[in-house]
Amino acid sequence: MLLRVTDLKTHFFTTRGVVRGVDGVSFTLEKGEVLGLAGESGCGKSTLGYSLIRLVPPPGRIVGGEIELDGLNLTSMNENTFRREVRWKRISMIFQGAMNALNPVYSIGYQMMEPFKYHTDASEDEAKERIARHLELVGLDPEIVSRYPHELSGGMKQRVMIAMALLLEPDLVIADEPTTALDVIVQAQIINLLKKLKKELGLSLIFITHDLSILAEISDKIAVMYAGKIVELGDSEIIYENPKHPYTQKLLAAIPRVHERVDKLEFIPGAPPNLANPPPGCRFHPRCPYAIKICMEKEPGKEVLDDGRVIYCHNIPR
């Protein structure tokens, strides 16, 4: 097992109260596996990703739980050791919005050289050789090292970010909505590239997105998040064919079907809760068509179904 996350809690301490961005999340990831992390905006997906690489912006911080990478406890590790030995070297991240992640005043080559200078004793020639190799791996001409971010298209910048994330050959890559703001054609190219890299490199990946239709293309299993918690987790094919949690059902029903005639798209009424003051019981109950009295009073516990999936629901639709 590559990654084990146990009861992870990341809270933001604001003047308006404690915002429970991630509130008791547990899952595992095997080597060479792709976990798709899905849910509406604000459900805690990106906060979970930043927690794994310990880059949660203030006033947020990890307040509970454990993160184990290949048996190594990351939550108890001091920051200097984590920065030197884990971040970017063993866990890397493809940040959301490549234009914002790349520094506009430095060339691509300069920015890609930085991880080598910090994490390895490689010579400059060795670093340049590996940079060229990884740019070719993602379908880019190595000559772009002399160019600046504004000279590249959105798809090219995203490929640069993927190359940078793979540069030190980490155990795990976290992709935080890597296809956001890209047109449909470029989205498909990025997804196909990640699928290719998974096959060729045995890439272990956590793919974060609000678009469940994208996860059908790349993920081995899916975790659906709502209001800081995972509500359903299991094999991607099983979840797509037979979603059990009402929230998962609604998310999948809202995806447009290209080959089906639909008179009206489904939608989820209402809005996600305020995580500084979440509703009692199941956090989805104000929007759930199957909610019963216990849903409003008691938080649902973990239930493992016969097909191996994990679900948190008092009244599972049959």
Image (cartoon, grey):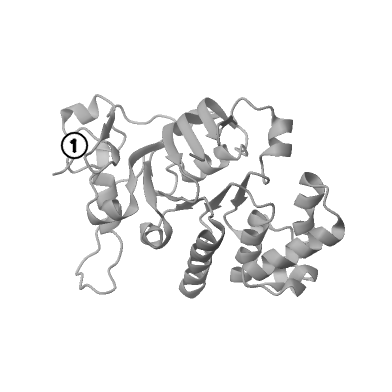
Q: Considering the numbered disc 1 on the image, is that residue within a helix, a strand or a loop? A: loop
Q: Is residue 251 above or below residue 274?
A: below
Residue placed at 66% from the left, 72% from the top?
140
Q: Is residue 96 left or right of residue 36?
A: right
Q: Residue 268, can we see it? A: no
Residue 141: image quadrant is bottom right
Q: Nearer the viewer, residue 100 or 269?
A: 100
**Residue on which disc 1 sits:** 291
Residue 232: image quadrant is top left
Q: Is residue 174 above or below residue 148?
A: above
Q: Nearer the viewer, residue 318 or 298?
A: 318
Q: Residue 142, can we see it? A: yes
Q: Where residue 45 sits in the image (x, y, percent)?
A: 47, 44
Amino acid residing under circle 1: Ala
Q: Where residue 21 sits in the image (x, y, percent)?
A: 47, 35
Residue placed at 46% from the left, 41% from the top?
44
Q: Is residue 152 left or right of residue 297?
A: right
In the rendered image, which quarter contains the C terminus?
A: top left
Q: Where residue 95 sits in the image (x, y, percent)?
A: 60, 53
Q: Is residue 280 above or below residue 126?
A: above
What is the tally of numbered marks visible in this picture?
1
Question: Callout 1 environment at 10 Å: few (<14), some (14 to 19), or many (20+)?
Answer: some
Residue placed at 28% from the left, 32% from the top?
282
Residue placed at 55% from the left, 29% from the top?
62
Q: Where residue 99 sits in the image (x, y, percent)?
A: 65, 61
Q: Nearer the viewer, residue 160 or 132?
A: 132
